[in-house]
Image (spheres, helix red, strand yellow):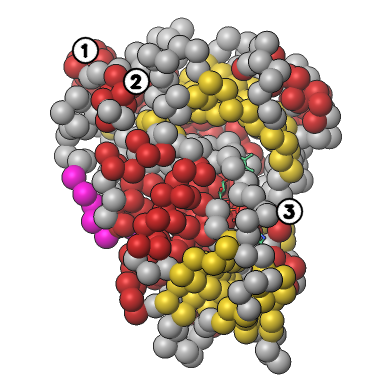
Amino acid sequence: MIRSVVIVGGGTAGWMTASYLKAAFGERVDVTLVESAQVSRIGVGEATFSTLRHFFDYLGLDEAEWLPKCAGGYKLGIRFENWSAPGEYFYHPFERLRVVDGFSLADWWLRLGDRNRPFDRECFVTTALCEAKRSPRMMDGSLFVAGLDGSLGRSTLAEQRAQFPYAYHFDADAVARFLADYAVERGVRHVIDNVAHIGQDERGWISHVRTEAHGDLTGDLFVDCTGFRGLLINQTLGGEFISFQDVLPNNRAVALRVPRDEVTEMNPYTTAAAASAGWIWTIPLFRRNGNGYVYSDEFITPEQAERELREAVAPGRDDLPANHIRMRIGRNQESWINNCVAVGLSSAFVEPLESTGIFFIQHAIEQLVKYFPDERWDPTLRREWNRRVAHAVDGVKEFLVLHYRSARREDTPYWKEAKVRTMPDALAARLELAGSVLLDEETVYPHFHGFEPYSWNTMNLGLGNVPAAPRPALEHIDPAAARAEFARVRADAAAMVAALPSCYEYLAAING
Ligand SMILES: Cc1cc2nc3c(=O)[nH]c(=O)nc-3n(C[C@H](O)[C@H](O)[C@H](O)COP(=O)(O)OP(=O)(O)OC[C@H]3O[C@@H](n4cnc5c(N)ncnc54)[C@H](O)[C@@H]3O)c2cc1C
């Protein structure tokens, strides 16, 4: 039986893993987490994915309890600005497309819609809430979508049947601290120390981690949460890292924390605004914005990036310190080797677009619980975990490459290059198909990676990669039901906007 787990690293990955293992296995498994006081956390990672509610529900944590402690806010989707032309924008919301007579509303929009009106505001309700900066919850705490509220209990990503309508923005450091308290209260041993050496037995399996002041920490299973350095998985076990740089060139970021002057208003969405050599994020937290420029240093220097970021989001605020970050883009060939599992940045990262870093952590931990080994160390469990983790990352990689390939913008060397850079063959085939028809379950990346066909279609349509013509079949179907559905979307949106409080108003209330 595997009785003890040692986690190295106390960033979001380390503390999410520690708290989840405690929630799953309680006292049956001892968990020790060691983190260095000298090596700081990455300190960004503030926008999330709608599936994160499963994680907190699994831990038995109520949103009203943890969200205010983490400077949190709501994210109804991502607003993409300037990806095709200056001033243009669209939303990628957490909302599935409605279906009429077997065809999605996006199909019907291609047939019936006013091409001068953005498709996202015709087909989704959530986009109206974004425009009106509404909270997804009424002042009494109820959700704007019926039937999705209430705790999901110990459910996992696999149980996500309906699309939950929002994710969170939060201070990632505060979340790590909050989860540390949760985990320690439930028995996780917390060691603050530097790991100076990793001990291995004659087979090459990890036997212990040697700390500077607390001696050797031994365990059965070791979890590498040491961030981009991959201290156990790469540096010690020699795990191969597959770079995605050939298709996703952004390898650096510069981040700023910007106090908000206007404190009575808050966007309930992340903004991703295309810039000269990448894109700039704006993540509204309760009292400040997190901003950052993700770029490729093949095209601009860190100094140029910092200047462009400051001009865009904090003009005149040269006092705000900038955090320059080098990113390792790609994934390990195998993130589970012998008795070591890597979770977080030590495992994989595909750049922050679409906010998938924390989602990958959640997915990897859930799968770890499902494929948890015993003393036989059945290699099939390890292989299956590796396969699933790799698929999730590879699917997101494809989806992100689509963003750059489908964007119409071509005004700088960076954006020109984005159109001719190599791309995965499977994606090339998918994009060719998308030039004629919208994608569906059969034609998007075929393994679980968090994104459904509606997301792939929303990005293609929003970025301007629109099928040349509507589906011919729709010529033969009475459009009355589709027209009625478009009218319902408009009516539902108007009713929600009228009924819901502003995002700021609601959060101010739960923040006391
Ligand atoms: C620019 C950028 C933007 C991002 N934006 C998002 C986003 O919007 N949404 C999202 O979901 N994700 C985002 N991410 C990803 C997200 O930040 C990470 O997935 C998440 O923070 C997890 O990081 P981590 O815990 O793996 O690593 P880290 O935060 O780097 O933590 C590493 C830990 O290892 C410890 N450590 C290292 N060496 C030693 C040692 N020798 N001894 C002891 N301890 C050691 C450190 O002390 C630290 O506690 C972003 C990442 C980057 C780079």
In front: mark 1 or mark 3?
1
Tell me which residue sits at (63%, 59%) in the image: 36
Q: Which range of residues does the magenta coloring cover?
A: 150-157
Mark positioned earlier in the residue sequence (1 or 3): 3
Distance CA(mark 1)–CA(mark 3): 48 Å
How dense is the environment of label 3, judged by Cα within 10 Å: few (below 14), some, or many (20 and up)?
Answer: some
Q: Are marks 1 and 2 in contact (CB under 8 Å)?
A: no
The local crowd at label 1, few if under 14, some if 14 to 19, many if 20 or more residues have their Cα within 10 Å, is few
- Tell me the distance, in whole angstroms, between the alpha carbons under discs 2 and 3: 40 Å
Residue at 33% x, 76% y: name it: 27
* Quadrant of the snapshot with the C terminus: top left
Disc 2 marks a residue whose amino acid type is Tyr
Disc 3 Cβ-to-ligand 1 distance below 8 Å: no
Residue matched to label 1? 498
Q: Residue at x 64, y 50 (%)?
A: 40
Q: Is residue 89 above or below residue 247?
A: above
Q: Is residue 310 magenta?
A: no
Residue 207 x %, y %: 62, 84
In this view of the protein, which residue sits in the foreground, 201 or 82? 201
- Which corner quadrant of the image does residue 455 belong to? top left
- For mark 1, give the secondary structure: helix
Task: Return the residue at label 3.
Answer: 243
> What's the mark number on residue 376?
none
Amino acid on which disc 3 is placed: Ser
Which residue: 23% across, 19% down? 500
- The residue that disc 2 covers is 504
Question: Majority secondary structure of the magenta segment?
Answer: loop
Q: Earlier in the sequence, mark 2 or mark 3?
A: 3
**Residue 502 visible to an observer of this rendering:** yes
